[in-house]
Image (tube, rainbow, N blue to C red):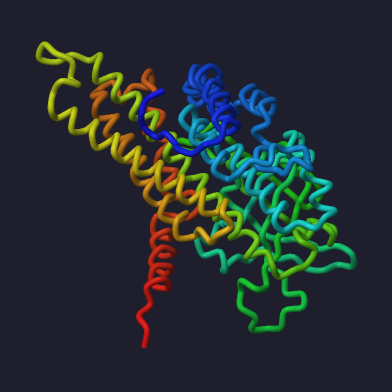
Amino acid sequence: MGRLAQTDGLTDVQREILSTVRDFVDKEIIPVATDLEHRDEYPAQIVEGLKDLGVFGLMIPEEYGGLGESLLTYALCVEEIARGWMSVSGIINTHFIVAYMLKQHGTQEQKDHFLPKMAAGEIRGAFSMSEPGLGSDVSAITSKGVRDGDDFLLTGQKMWLTNGGTSTLVAVLCRTDEGHPEGTAPHKSMTTFLIEKEPGFGEVKPGLTIPGKIDKMGYKGVDTTELIMDGLRVPADRVLGGATGRGFYQMMDGVEVGRVNVAARGCGVAQRAFELGVAYAQQRQTFGKPIAQHQAIQFKLAEMGTKVEAAHAMMVNAARKKDSGRRNDLEAGMAKYLASEYCKEVVEDAFRIHGGYGFSKEYEIERLYREAPMLLIGEGTAEIQKMIIGRRLLEEYRIQG
């Protein structure tokens, strides 16, 4: 374990959890990740191993069978897992966001029903905001939930659903006009519905279709899908928190911790790229000496190492702020923006260090080169992060009078 991306002030329990996850990544993920990724194969055995380690219940309270750990512990585990294969961290992240939303906003019945099974990995979560006709403009969603007696009927099409096929519980954001007069702000007429389903593709229950996997440049193994609702019947007691109109705030709370997670993924992928680059630079010889002895390569390694360290520090700061109960949207936005941009740059430098071999599928850096771009757009693009950061800075530094 190198000197970079160390975290001071961890408890013995946190260090033990991280050590266990790191060993699992080194032994069970890194040796098989590239082969599975090239086949676009779901990492079933890895997921079972993570279930056994308790990773799916990491932040779920102990009273529901989880480990009750902090966001920081979770983010550091994600960093380790993404270092092995980013797709695996995506499988866990969507599950974690739904569990977090249930813990923070669910009714007691919803918590009692879902959280113990989620902690054990028996119920696997996914969440859905985006639609084909909109990107980051969540307020423009058109999927609707209409009251029908004791149920709601949901209609609409959702896009970019990570874990869409393998999940058994999906938190879906829809527009509901119930109790909201015309002219109500769009974000105040949105509701999060908890949809229970069977895993698989096609019509998985009446009114609900998961068409199939979207073929992607990278981020393979994990299934990314559409979700089509056509008169899908959902009981009213599966409205998150029991009341309509709160969905936007619930989802944004989930996305806020999700952004810390994406920052952690960027840190993990950048770390792995640095490890690959610094190792290759010491093995590859040109002009009679290892390329690591050429100043041009040392400059690259210096920049890469500095970026890995800076991104890790910002990610840890954002997680600790949330754990302390304080608002962290500024810090989470900054961490996500910086970590994803630096990840792309570190991966590209490692790719350049590998020369022609970086372009070969035999070398791991080829996979990382295709995975890094997803972090630039996941959980809100860089441009969205900059909008959030800019607005929050103006709030903090508003001139008086």
Q: Is residue 141 above or below residue 186?
A: above
> From this viewpoint, which residue is outermost toward the top?
288
Residue 107 position, x and y percent, is 80, 58
Q: Is residue 35 visible?
A: no
Residue toward you, 284 or 55: 55
Q: Is residue 195 above or below residue 86?
A: below
Residue toward you, 277 or 231: 277
- Tell me what residue is drawn at x 60 percent, y 65 percent: 141
- Tell me what residue is drawn at x 18 percent, y 28 percent: 297
Quadrant holding the N terminus: top left
Residue 254 position, x and y percent, is 61, 54
Q: Is residue 42 visible?
A: yes
Residue 150 position, x and y percent, is 89, 64
Residue 235 falls in image quadrant: bottom right
Residue 153 position, x and y percent, is 79, 62
- Tell me what residue is drawn at x 68 percent, y 83 percent: 182
